[in-house]
Image: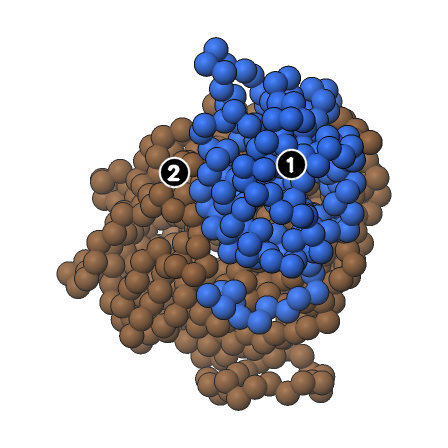
Chain colours: A brown, B blue
């Protein structure tokens, strides 16, 4: 019989477990049971990495029983994929989930390499799923779509499930991980002797932070409401899969790669001592110059790389990374503020710091609107009992519009009333934000680099410049609130020659 | 995963002040199995929602006097039934449950089913007021209220899912074409069919 109430975990002791750092995924050395198809060699010999989707027990907190989740290679979040510019990668994804699983989510899975530039066949079309026992290879070219323009090379990306109808459930089950990208300039080496190397904090001082929020039943199992149409807001705040962990840091600079991987929750991050930090990269790559900020707003799907310098603090200093947005559901934060610590930094040692944060990180050409071939309105609204784009729901057989390869378009992203936010995400490539509410000056400095998620609050609009590259075929665009996208607030662009 | 193996820190007073006191959170249980409630069907049978067995289900909430969205949704289901063909009753059951628990009699239900040529594998049913209320609660829907004009404001969603698989989804009726609804109901019900073509071959 239907029970009306469910016992869930209300609160747990914060800062009793260390922050885990997902392992970097090493290229596979093993002999493949199935050879790579010829297409995978299009950009030379690829690095081969293997992601196996499988069930595994995950411990969110020592006071809560372990949770059976879906993982990539047995960990939540999954291992971090590392790309280098000029070295293509083949991701072999193997679905080893239980075909007889019963519960939310679906074992038919899709992989989306979020923020990457890849052909539609490798991009994660929501119906390109594989079943338990099957595998699929994805080619990530790791080349610049615009020759010699490094601004098209991302910094922090991520990968996650993207199957039709069940993306929210599958990502909540644990199917998400992060991606780090490097090149000769951002070289993953703070001791790099090259005069052009940026020498940003690297190695153990380059730390991915994936933020997510969960509700757990008292037996440790995941609580997830499949019929929540606004996006579920969890009461347990996780960083890299652990509830409110601590992180012992050295008194020096760190690069943190922040990913908002929630079901709808937004964050506004700040440090408990209100100290400034530097934002050096957004979704699409490094910014032109670091932007000093004290608060950073993030929505589902967004990434920002920030530098926190602990060198001025005496040993023993404790600083919490805070968020004070309060959600009842995933549609939007409420009007009240409730400060909640997410992660505790403990300065516990000294360490040499050869890293630097150059005042010039990247050359980003100004947006060129002179060759725009089409201007489009892309409106997000609640109509007909659901979430729509341009008054339409996702139709896998009919594109939202057709575009021409190797052209540039200007898109007006418009969100209707009701106060609901819609984080816009497009799969083709990142965009440049030209204006917010028709005011170019309203685009904050940290949003002036390349972006693949553009949050548009209710009643507001943003104008973006979309350069469509050479691949032809189907690319998704959608709201990145997973509940909204599962209810078909999605469309696709048919890119033609 | 790489983890620093160290003891948890003793918290400084300024950090302790940031920790909020515990608060109680009550939650309604999320759907896994459709609520087992008695159904009075258009065929004059008394059964329960268990009748769906291991099949997938498409669930419509309607009322016979509706002159708003219900006729269109019922037509959508009629056409979906045609798309499903022999899968209806074998793989998928359609369940139309009346929200108008005080007015819709079994005779009303029967007449409605006849009018819409409801085929085998599709149950049109009335439920008791208390069961209807519980079902709405499970589906996260507000209680229905009879307006002064005799109309009921109600959901524009059609639900589909599987008790056996514990998966449930919904789609706005305006989003659904018969082909899409049939395919997505089968997609959610069946986890062994490979993706032959990535757009359903349409």
Q: Is residue A11 visible?
A: no
Nearer-the-camera pick, A269 or B15: A269
Give the labeled residue for mark 2: A381
Q: Is residue A410 left or right of residue A22?
A: left
Nearer-the-camera pick, A170 or B21: A170
Looking at the rendered structure, the secondary structure element under dot 1 is strand
Q: Is residue A322 above or below residue A281?
A: above
Mark 2 Cα within 10 Å, few/some/many (few <14, many 20+)? Answer: many
Q: Is residue A186 above or below residue A234?
A: below
Which residue is located at x 39 percent, y 70 percent?
A: A473
Q: Is residue A454 visible?
A: yes
Residue B95 image offset from top left, x and y in percent: 65, 40
Nearer-the-camera pick, A226 or A288: A226
Q: Is residue A431 left or right of residue A260?
A: left
User: Of tags 2 and 1, which is closer to the observer?
Assistant: 1
Label 2–label 1 contact, CB within 8 A: no
Residue A48 image offset from top left, x and y in percent: 61, 79
Q: Is residue A339 left or right of residue A154?
A: right
Give the labeled residue for mark 1: B124
Judging from the image, mark 1 belongs to the subunit labelled: B
Q: Is residue A411 left or right of residue A189?
A: left
* Residue furthest to the left: A370
């Amino acid at each position: 019989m239907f029970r009306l109430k469910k016992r869930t975990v209300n609160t747990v002791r914060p800062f009793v477990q260390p922050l885990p750092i997902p392992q970097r995924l090493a290229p596979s050395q093993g002999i493949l049971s199935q050879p790579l198809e010829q297409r995978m060699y299009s950009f030379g010999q690829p690095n081969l990495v293997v992601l196996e989707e499988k069930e595994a027990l995950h411990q969110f907190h020592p006071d809560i029983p372990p949770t059976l989740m879906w993982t990539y290679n047995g960990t939540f979040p999954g291992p971090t994929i590392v790309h280098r510019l000029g070295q293509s990668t083949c991701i072999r994804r193997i679905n080893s989930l239980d075909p007889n699983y019963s519960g939310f989510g679906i074992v038919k899975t899709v992989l989306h390499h979020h923020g990457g530039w890849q052909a539609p066949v490798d991009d994660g079309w929501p119906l390109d799923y594989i079943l338990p026992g099957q595998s699929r290879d994805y080619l990530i070219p790791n080349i610049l779509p615009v020759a010699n323009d490094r601004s098209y090379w991302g910094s922090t990306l991520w990968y996650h499930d993207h199957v039709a109808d069940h993306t929210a459930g599958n990502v909540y089950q644990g199917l998400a991980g992060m991606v780090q990208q490097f090149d000769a300039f951002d070289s993953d080496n703070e001791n790099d002797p090259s005069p052009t190397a940026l020498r940003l904090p690297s190695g153990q001082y380059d730390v991915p932070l994936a933020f997510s929020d969960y509700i757990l039943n008292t037996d440790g199992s995941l609580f997830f409401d499949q019929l929540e149409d606004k996006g579920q807001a969890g009461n347990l705040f996780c960083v890299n899969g652990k509830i409110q962990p601590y992180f012992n840091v050295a008194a020096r600079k760190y690069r943190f790669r922040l990913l908002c991987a929630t079901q709808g929750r937004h964050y506004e991050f700040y440090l408990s001592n209100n100290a400034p930090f530097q934002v050096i990269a957004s979704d699409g790559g490094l910014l032109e110059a670091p932007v000093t900020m004290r608060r950073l707003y993030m929505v589902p799907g967004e990434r920002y790389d920030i530098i926190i310098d602990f060198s001025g603090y005496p040993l023993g200093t404790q600083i919490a990374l805070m968020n004070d947005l309060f959600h009842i559901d995933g549609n939007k934060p409420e009007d009240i503020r409730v400060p909640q610590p997410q992660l505790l930094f403990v300065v516990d040692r000294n360490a040499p710091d050869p890293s630097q944060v150059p005042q010039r990180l990247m050359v980003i050409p100004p947006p060129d609107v002179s060759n725009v071939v089409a201007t489009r309105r892309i409106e997000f609204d609640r109509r007909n009992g659901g979430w729509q784009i341009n008054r339409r729901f996702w139709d896998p057989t009919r594109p939202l519009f057709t575009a021409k390869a190797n052209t540039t378009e200007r898109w007006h992203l418009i969100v209707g009333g009701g106060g609901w936010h819609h984080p816009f995400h497009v799969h083709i490539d990142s965009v440049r934000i030209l204006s917010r509410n028709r005011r170019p000056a309203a685009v904050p400095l940290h949003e002036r680099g390349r972006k693949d998620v553009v949050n548009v609050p209710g009643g507001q609009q943003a104008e973006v410049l979309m350069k469509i590259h050479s691949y032809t075929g189907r690319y998704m665009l959608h709201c990145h609130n997973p509940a909204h996208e599962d209810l078909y607030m999605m469309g696709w662009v048919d890119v033609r020659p | 995963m790489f983890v620093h193996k160290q003891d948890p820190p003793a918290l400084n007073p300024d950090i302790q002040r940031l920790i909020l006191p515990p608060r109680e959170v009550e939650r309604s249980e999320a759907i896994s199995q459709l609520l087992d409630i008695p159904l009075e069907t258009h065929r004059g049978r008394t059964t329960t929602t268990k009748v769906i067995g291991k099949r997938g289900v498409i669930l419509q909430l309607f009322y016979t006097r509706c002159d708003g969205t219900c006729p269109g949704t019922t037509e959508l289901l009629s056409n979906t039934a045609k798309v499903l063909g022999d899968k209806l009753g074998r793989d998928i059951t359609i369940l139309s449950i009346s929200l108008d628990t005080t007015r819709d009699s079994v005779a009303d239900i029967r007449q409605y089913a006849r009018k819409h040529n409801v085929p085998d594998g599709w149950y049109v049913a009335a439920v008791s007021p208390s069961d209807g209320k519980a079902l709405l609660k499970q589906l996260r829907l507000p209680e229905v209220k009879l307006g002064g004009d005799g109309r009921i404001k109600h959901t524009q969603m059609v639900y589909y899912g599987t008790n056996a698989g514990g998966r449930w989804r919904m789609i706005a009726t305006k989003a659904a074409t018969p082909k899409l609804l049939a395919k997505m109901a089968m997609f959610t019900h069946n986890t062994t069919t490979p993706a032959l073509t990535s757009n359903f071959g349409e």
